[in-house]
Amino acid sequence: MSQTVLLLLLFLLSSLSPLSFSDPDPVLDFCIPDAGRGPIQLTHLPTYPCKNPLNVTSHDFTFSNLKPPSHLSGFAGTAVTPVQFPALHTLGASFARADFEPGAVNPPHYHPRATETALVVEGAVYSGFVDSGGRVYAKVIEKGDVMVFPRGMVHFQMNAGEERASIFASFNGENPGVVKLPVTVFGSGIMEELLEKAFDLSEREVERLKKIFGSK
Amino acid sequence: MSQTVLLLLLFLLSSLSPLSFSDPDPVLDFCIPDAGRGPIQLTHLPTYPCKNPLNVTSHDFTFSNLKPPSHLSGFAGTAVTPVQFPALHTLGASFARADFEPGAVNPPHYHPRATETALVVEGAVYSGFVDSGGRVYAKVIEKGDVMVFPRGMVHFQMNAGEERASIFASFNGENPGVVKLPVTVFGSGIMEELLEKAFDLSEREVERLKKIFGSK
Amino acid sequence: MSQTVLLLLLFLLSSLSPLSFSDPDPVLDFCIPDAGRGPIQLTHLPTYPCKNPLNVTSHDFTFSNLKPPSHLSGFAGTAVTPVQFPALHTLGASFARADFEPGAVNPPHYHPRATETALVVEGAVYSGFVDSGGRVYAKVIEKGDVMVFPRGMVHFQMNAGEERASIFASFNGENPGVVKLPVTVFGSGIMEELLEKAFDLSEREVERLKKIFGSK
Amino acid sequence: MSQTVLLLLLFLLSSLSPLSFSDPDPVLDFCIPDAGRGPIQLTHLPTYPCKNPLNVTSHDFTFSNLKPPSHLSGFAGTAVTPVQFPALHTLGASFARADFEPGAVNPPHYHPRATETALVVEGAVYSGFVDSGGRVYAKVIEKGDVMVFPRGMVHFQMNAGEERASIFASFNGENPGVVKLPVTVFGSGIMEELLEKAFDLSEREVERLKKIFGSK
Amino acid sequence: MSQTVLLLLLFLLSSLSPLSFSDPDPVLDFCIPDAGRGPIQLTHLPTYPCKNPLNVTSHDFTFSNLKPPSHLSGFAGTAVTPVQFPALHTLGASFARADFEPGAVNPPHYHPRATETALVVEGAVYSGFVDSGGRVYAKVIEKGDVMVFPRGMVHFQMNAGEERASIFASFNGENPGVVKLPVTVFGSGIMEELLEKAFDLSEREVERLKKIFGSK
Amino acid sequence: MSQTVLLLLLFLLSSLSPLSFSDPDPVLDFCIPDAGRGPIQLTHLPTYPCKNPLNVTSHDFTFSNLKPPSHLSGFAGTAVTPVQFPALHTLGASFARADFEPGAVNPPHYHPRATETALVVEGAVYSGFVDSGGRVYAKVIEKGDVMVFPRGMVHFQMNAGEERASIFASFNGENPGVVKLPVTVFGSGIMEELLEKAFDLSEREVERLKKIFGSK
């Protein structure tokens, strides 16, 4: 094999195309991206070929690192998608953990690609969402309660109790995505004049918010 | 049969079930809701049985009312979904027209259920969106340009020229939905304390914004 | 209202069924079946129109009855679908709770219409599934671990500890369905000769198993 | 039953909403439209509520009328969709039988909503399709051969042998639809001038073809 | 770089093809095929990895070349899919422009993979489609009107005015495909005997039509 | 070509795998994996680029090897998926043939990713399925009858006649998968204690069944 062909193959190995862009029905039982076979810079995140089922074990299907954060300051959210738990790839599911100190806030955000069912594991949380008609549905939910946030709807949470609170969230998509409103609106670099007009804020207010959220 | 049962049945007549909750592949060529066979209060919007194809004409498939607003003050958006153009029902498509006076703004918003392709019909428009990583993609687009806003991404527009501007937008869904951020965040009734913390605003600022957007 | 009608309504209330037959993308933000507006005989089970959003409250989106069973004998599973939690309807998600006494077993079964992610809430559980090539992936998982069972794959669990164990399971479908293998194979009435040949069991063994599982 | 209630029921029967417009994943095991509960003029074809599973038997899942036509003159095609075999409803599948006298033709047509796999049951058939790039793939296929026609591609068949030929066709959709080109183009009433220009035919030729195919 | 390689790259640049085979929900915000990172021979056409979002700019999401043809002779159609506008890839949308001289015709054709909404930008166009029951729905539509052609249905257009006419068409699919009936039927090489029988044409007529459409 | 490469190709030919993981709508007319263009290690199995349409012929779309087995002993099933018939790739369809000696059994199994329509080509077959409520639907079907098995439901067959029987089965998915219950339950290595409890079998019975089905 000539060196040119070899280089070409090496290049190809480093640039293979994504395994899937979607959350449709799987046509295989599963496909565990194979990190051992090298990262493939497909998207800006690495993707991998499927592991050979002969090398797959029960450990591949178990995720054991969904622990509470050791140092919690305010709010901490941890999403588990195929990046953290490769077995989820092509299965149309992912999950997350959220921990709140008393009074801490999970700011208004939405998931463009999944419905969320949130189980309160500990504590009491003011929790809710806003529908596309601008109606808010919010209340304090407690340990054992489950609240559902329909796909694409803005939702938010705040620890309403005096103890730490935590939530286990499930998503019906492999990569739900998260759009955090404060950063998206004020920290992304949208033209200031537009933000002033859209949110009825002064130039000074918008500048202040850009500084706060632009660095996040 | 008792009168109670009769009332129950009458009630049922006014509350039949929706024709469809989804944007999947059609299994009929088309299904035009039949207003002539009586409004069915299924959802809070009326839905109808399909028209008999023998009564369907070419007029059913044409929408002729996408005119510029006669009195334009600032920004005006007109969406055309099956509510306005019944033939779109089950076909996975809808469209809209937007008109802007110079400097007028279409505030940050997103469509949870469709990708948008926006054609500039007239004028020059500062236009863009923010991805879920907080990166903004915005520029001035002009007559004949098409910009695409991926499903579920926050986008916005402002007339950047000195003449009226207008846009024709197409959606790949029957009911894209629209979530307008100023009203959703500040006008829906989310607890003030949460908003103050999430957006780093004072109590007074949040109260002012609630008044402005709560009445919309 | 006559007692017959009352009983009918009680029956209907206990058997609420989804309006649609599929788990596709929603075209509405949500649709909460409106039990208060009476049963509609669309399927053999009653279906309901969507609640008017003006009558929807935060309570509709919260499920508070996912409690451990008061008297646990062996294994107990509780599924929460739109029948129990109407807000899930059209949202493509449901969930369940399972409780195990030490040594108790959740027999081999599968969900034809959803992938399951199972979080161990308490205890230690021998848990696994078999892929379509006949390979088993099983291990003991503990509090905080999550195991994923791909859609349509046979899976099973047994409390492997000395304390009660419990699991919170999430599904990426509104109505995952459950096919329990012992009852399906031996309790459904498949011709005995076929079962004897397929499972290499004697006539007497099959007869015994039919008695045990046929009554369940 | 009072006359009011009767009228009310008649109205309901004439206005119930369709069970589904699509071929998505089912959320029930099955749904057999219940003809015994009365035709519901939903679309121009009748639709029905689901049969109560307690009344469903093995006969509902079997179709026994796929016989060769008693008098075959030329070509005869028989489609079996939920109209003929209600159990197919919501299951995403349907099928058909085609019989050909020697030399008989199944004219160019396509199925907008399904891929077809055609098994030759008897005889030898010149069979093929044209892709969207205008390339034809055609050959004579014989008893036991299977040819696949991708969804939406124009295909055609002609008995190439000296005996009767027959085909069993399967579709991956509940209602594939069939668009027959001769009738669609020349028999539907498209403006003659357009047809003359599009197909480079004289006024007289178009008029002759309109007469032939317009009456079919 | 050798000239051969250069030509190869030029060819590749002109034939960029989608990475996936379907139009499902995206699992990324977007994926812009990255021509700069080299061709990957995945399909017969080259495919590319996604651009790194850090290298993506607002220009990637804007298409500015939808201009009227400089020399219009008869009818000209210009489709814009991911081949021309890579950002459309995975987003389930594409669009086209059509220009007509007076009397010019867009011959009967269909799109197997998308519904079309056609906006008249200029002029008056006789426009319509035929459903799978052979019913035609056609009329003259004018500037500002929108007509919808359901997925997979044969449709056609002719400039009915005395000035140039033009149309902006939107599709709810990344790669709608186009099947042009005159070329497909008469220009693809279907056996002449079959065409004669199917369309009731003489051997001479079919031969003439084959010559006309076979070279296109 | 060296022998190593030849062996590699032979291996590849026997293990051709689909490019995608799902059964969604195609975005190309078709994509025939091109074995001649070399293996691409995308999954653990090699995948191939699409054949260049210029090299595709009518032979690619025809499968001619669906013959009865020359030596039939008991039951024989032959599935035809893209592995055997590459043209099926991305088209959402596959098929199979089953042959039964008198009394032979196709043991209880299910297809997690497709509905099956089974045509009796010859003989008489006791055939049925069990729904998720544990109800069996079974009967003897004969030549020309078609029975439908909904996706994911356990089904089974036994030759009920005195002659050989055969069935042609169609699936509405590219890779339906098959989960055979005897092997899955008793032959996969599920912990014996769990099986004893779940199926009410003695340790000895489970050990015997493990030996029988574990070697298959």
Image: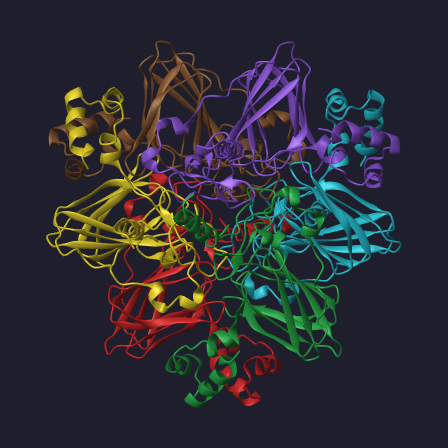
Chain colours: A green, B red, C cyan, D brown, E yellow, F purple
Whether residue D114 is visible to the viewer of this picture, yes or no, is: no
Left of C160 or right of it: where is C171?
left
Left of A61 or right of it: where is E169?
left
Whether residue F83 is situated above or below residue B84 in the rendered picture: above
Left of F57 or right of it: where is A92?
right
Whether residue B143 is visible to the viewer of this picture, yes or no, is: yes
Residue furthest to the front:
A2
Whether residue A186 is situated above or below residue C216 in the rendered picture: below
Question: What x and y, as percent, mark residue B200?
Answer: 55, 84
- Please identify the quarter of the rendering in which residue E183 is found: top left
Question: What x and y, as percent, mark residue F71?
Answer: 60, 14
Q: Nearer the viewer, residue D204 or A171?
A: A171
- Please identify the quarter of the rendering in which residue B30 is found: top left
Q: How many marks?
A: 0
Q: Nearer the viewer, residue B39 or B69?
A: B69
- Residue located 22% across and 30% down the image: E186
- Residue located 43% across and 51% down the image: A7
Whether residue D46 is situated above or below residue B159 in the rendered picture: above
Task: Quadrant for the N terminus of chain A, please.
Answer: top left
Question: What x and y, as percent, mark residue F115?
Answer: 56, 34
Q: Nearer the viewer, residue A42 or B156?
A: A42
Question: What x and y, as percent, mark residue D35?
Answer: 55, 32
